[in-house]
Image (tube, rainbow, N blue to C red):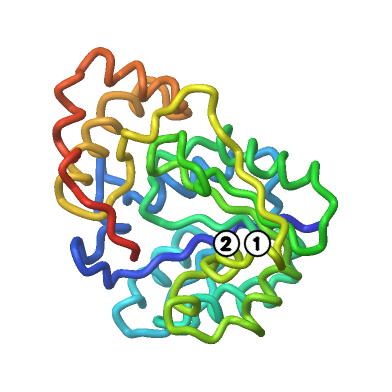
């Protein structure tokens, strides 16, 4: 069973264009996230799924330099892009990640994959986002290729095509949905990058933790907020926008 992490990435963010290639300590946010995802114990392959638009040539160039596999597809039909990308690499299980989560913890990714592997259902979907208990930025969805194919063939609304798993989540009578929850609720933390305030916070976290502990965990970051509680106010006012 081939487990493939497919990370969607594009330069055309409406609120912070080019965010995935912004740099901290001389490295792009995308490179930090890829480094962390590679630490998963279950992922066999990582694929960056970007668009066929000229502006995303920069992401392709990054992937080529870093020797990271990539796939180019539709900018607006992201469900189609994912289906084609998964088909291209013969994935059996897809780990869906978004490229705006540069400090995602591979331990949290693996908890979702482990939950997926413990289920036996052809149309399985497991995530840690159906009921949020983790900081935003730990978002992980895992589903079967068959579930992706079902969504690709059946979803017909514009929103369902724009958001890869929306059709799955909204049709629990078809898909076997499961959520991975944390014992404590940390969902008030926002560790994703969609605005300059988000980038400012992530930059401070990386600059503080990465030099002495590159493989820092979610718990390390939580301890950082105990030390610097004022950091919480940097981006708490930001409203999440699906991108």
Viewport quadrant of the N terminus? bottom right
Residue at horizontal 75 percent and vertical 63 percent from the top:
123
The residue shown at (25%, 49%) is 23
Task: Please name the residue that numbered disc 2 is placed on.
Answer: 169
Q: Secondary structure at mark 2?
A: helix
Query: Do the residues under discs 1 and 2 have CB atoms within 8 angstroms?
Result: yes
Closer-to-camera residue (56/16): 16
From the viewer's perspective, tell me whether residue 6 is left or right of residue 88.
left
Quarter of the image that includes the C terminus: bottom left
Instruction: Give the side of residue 198 with respect to residue 187, left or right.
Output: left
Q: Residue at the front extreme? A: 173
Q: Nearer the viewer, residue 34 or 94?
A: 94
The secondary structure type at the circle numbered 1 is: loop
Instruction: Decide if residue 151 is on the left or right side of residue 215.
Output: right
User: Which residue position is annotated with label 1?
Assistant: 172
Q: Give how far across and how far down residue 107 sits, in percent.
A: 58, 32
Task: Check disc 1: other Cα within 10 Å, few if <14, some if 14-19, many if 20+.
Answer: few
Q: Nearer the viewer, mark 1 or mark 2?
A: 1
């Amino acid at each position: 069973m081939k487990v493939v992490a497919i990370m969607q990435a594009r330069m055309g963010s409406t609120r912070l264009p080019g965010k995935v290639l912004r740099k901290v300590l001389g490295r792009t946010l995308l490179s930090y996230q890829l480094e962390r995802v590679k630490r998963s114990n279950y992922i066999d392959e990582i694929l960056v799924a970007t668009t066929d638009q000229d502006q995303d040539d920069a992401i392709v160039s990054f992937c080529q330099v870093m020797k990271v596999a990539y796939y180019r597809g539709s900018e607006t039909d992201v469900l189609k892009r994912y289906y084609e990308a998964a088909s291209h690499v013969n994935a059996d299980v897809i780990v869906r990640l978004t490229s705006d989560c540069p400090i995602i913890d591979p331990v949290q990714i693996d908890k979702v994959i482990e939950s997926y592997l413990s289920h036996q259902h052809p149309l399985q979907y497991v995530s840690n986002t159906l009921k949020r208990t983790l900081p935003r930025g730990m978002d992980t969805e895992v589903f079967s290729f068959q579930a992706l194919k079902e969504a690709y063939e059946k979803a017909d609304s514009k929103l369902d095509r724009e958001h890869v798993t929306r059709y799955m989540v909204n049709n629990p009578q078809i898909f076997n949905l499961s959520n991975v929850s944390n014992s404590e609720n940390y969902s008030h933390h926002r560790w994703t990058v969609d605005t300059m305030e988000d980038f400012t916070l992530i930059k401070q976290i990386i600059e503080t933790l990465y030099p002495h502990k590159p493989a820092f965990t979610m718990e390390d970051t939580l301890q950082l907020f105990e030390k610097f509680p004022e950091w919480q106010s940097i981006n708490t006012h930001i409203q999440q926008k699906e991108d």
